[in-house]
């Protein structure tokens, strides 16, 4: 039996989640966010699966954009951090990449550029996030300056919502008011949470990200969306043995067996991207039942308490996250978010793609 650490990507679930976004914002164009290897799900497989039903893709840099063009995808591709130096502008022009413009130096770089084809730009306004973007007071002048430049094609507007995942806070409404006072052309404000909850944020373009991959964007446990998990992370039991009472498990013996008990070892660890700081009790599903992880996570292995599944044996599948347990639960136990769990999976985790009940490897 070869070592198994595998992420099965359900492309039917991915398309279902895109349908949820489309129904939530029926009048908006969809810019599917594919940053960080499509949140760890596989850039090109995700892009091709969504291609017929979205109007654009959002990535962070040219290293993520160019594979989409090389794969033949002709969609609008928006680079959310824009260009990092003026030397990139001919590439943006040649490959028809949209640039988010968020700093004055970028405008001056465009003013000095001699390009064969103008670049479509998204003017980023900082309405309250405190990261990228012009202040509302400066955004109008920046837009006017961009409109005079031969190197600039169409101009659209963009902002990012800081608290859309917390509907009880007033921040989102305030941000949308500031943005609405400025953005009179095609605009985008809605991330996943706003796509699902804030209809007034939809504008002309929505930017679903984490919701496409089946994880809820909301921090409130009571807010649910009809999303299907796309990734199931699976490994195998590679050892089952009984340890005596008082025996330690793993580095530093963080867990000590309270009684003689069966302990299993699962073929996954932080070298695969499983969170190193997962605490005792983090659930793993074996033979249809949850069992608690015990002891510190190693580079290649974790240990589990098999007292509730005494029939477990070497070779049994171990589900780390998917439908049950969901990635959001594992993330909460580890003090992080599902975004990070997905993005941290390393290349040695095999990706297997499922469509219509049929599996195919990466």
Image: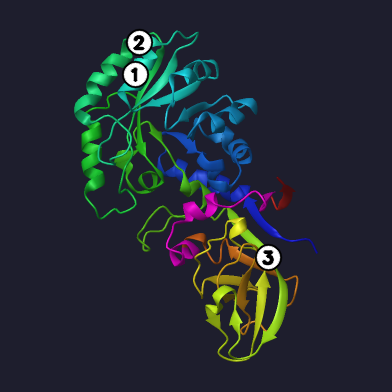
Any magenta on residue 335?
yes
**Cα distance, mark 3 to mark 2?**
57 Å
Q: Is residue 295 visible?
A: no
- Mark 3 residue element: loop
Q: Looking at the image, which residue sits at the far right?
A: 1
Q: How many marks?
A: 3
Q: Residue beneath label 1, please?
A: 107
Q: Looking at the image, which residue sits at the far front?
A: 252
- Residue 327: x, y in percent? 51, 60
Q: Residue beneath label 3, please?
A: 267
- Residue 124: x, y in percent? 33, 30
In this view of the protein, which residue sits in the foreground, 322 or 196? Answer: 322
Q: Is residue 164 visible?
A: yes
- Quadrant where the N terminus is found in the figure: bottom right
Q: Mark 1: few, some, or many residues within 10 Å (few <14, many ≥20)? A: many
Q: Which quadrant of the figure has residue 224? A: bottom left
Q: Earlier in the sequence, mark 2 or mark 1?
A: 1
* 87 displayed left or right of 161: right
Which residue occupies 53% across, 46% down? 39
In this view, the mark in front (2 or 1) = 1
For residue 87, the mark is none
- Residue 354: x, y in percent? 68, 50
Which residue occupies 62% across, 85% down? 307
- Mark 2 residue element: loop
- Residue 287: x, y in percent? 67, 74
Q: Which quadrant of the figure has residue 311? A: bottom right
**Cα distance, mark 2 to mark 1?**
9 Å
Q: Residue beneath label 2, please?
A: 149
Q: Which residues are magenta?
A: 329-355
In this view, the mark in front (3 or 2) = 3
**Cα distance, mark 3 to mark 1?**
51 Å
* 362 displayed left or right of 64: right
């Amino acid at each position: 039996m070869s070592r198994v650490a595998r992420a099965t990507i359900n492309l039917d679930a991915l398309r279902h989640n895109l349908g949820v976004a489309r129904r939530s914002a029926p009048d908006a164009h969809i810019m599917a966010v594919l940053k960080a290897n499509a949140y760890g799900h596989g850039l090109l497989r995700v892009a091709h699966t969504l291609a017929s039903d979205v109007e654009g893709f959002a990535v962070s840099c040219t290293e993520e954009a160019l594979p989409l063009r090389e794969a033949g995808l002709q969609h609008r591709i928006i680079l959310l951090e824009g260009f990092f130096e003026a030397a990139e502008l001919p590439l943006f022009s040649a490959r028809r990449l949209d640039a988010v413009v968020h700093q004055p130096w970028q405008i001056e770089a465009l003013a000095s550029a001699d390009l064969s084809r103008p670049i479509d730009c998204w003017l980023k306004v900082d309405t309250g996030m405190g990261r990228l973007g012009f202040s509302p007071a400066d955004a109008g002048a920046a837009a006017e300056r961009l409109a005079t430049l031969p190197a600039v094609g169409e101009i659209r507007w963009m902002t990012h919502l800081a608290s859309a995942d917390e509907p009880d806070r007033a921040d989102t409404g305030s941000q949308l008011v500031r943005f609405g006072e400025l953005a009179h052309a095609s605009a985008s404000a809605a991330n996943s949470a706003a796509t699902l909850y804030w209809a007034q944020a939809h504008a002309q373009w929505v930017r679903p990200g984490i919701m496409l991959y089946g994880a809820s964007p909301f921090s409130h446990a009571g807010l649910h969306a009809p999303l299907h998990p796309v990734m199931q992370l699976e490994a195998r039991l590679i050892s089952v043995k009984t340890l005596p009472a008082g025996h330690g498990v793993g580095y530093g013996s963080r867990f000590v067996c309270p009684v003689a008990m069966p302990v299993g070892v699962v073929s996954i660890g932080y070298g695969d991207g499983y969170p190193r700081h997962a605490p005792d009790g983090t659930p793993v599903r074996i033979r249809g039942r949850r069992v608690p992880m015990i002891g510190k996570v190693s580079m290649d292995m974790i240990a589990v308490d098999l007292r509730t599944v005494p029939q477990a044996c070497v070779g049994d599948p171990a589900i780390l996250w998917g439908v049950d347990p969901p990635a959001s639960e594992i993330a909460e136990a580890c003090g992080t978010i599902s975004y990070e769990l997905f993005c941290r999976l390393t290349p040695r985790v095999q990706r297997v793609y499922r469509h219509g009940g049929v599996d195919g490897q990466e």
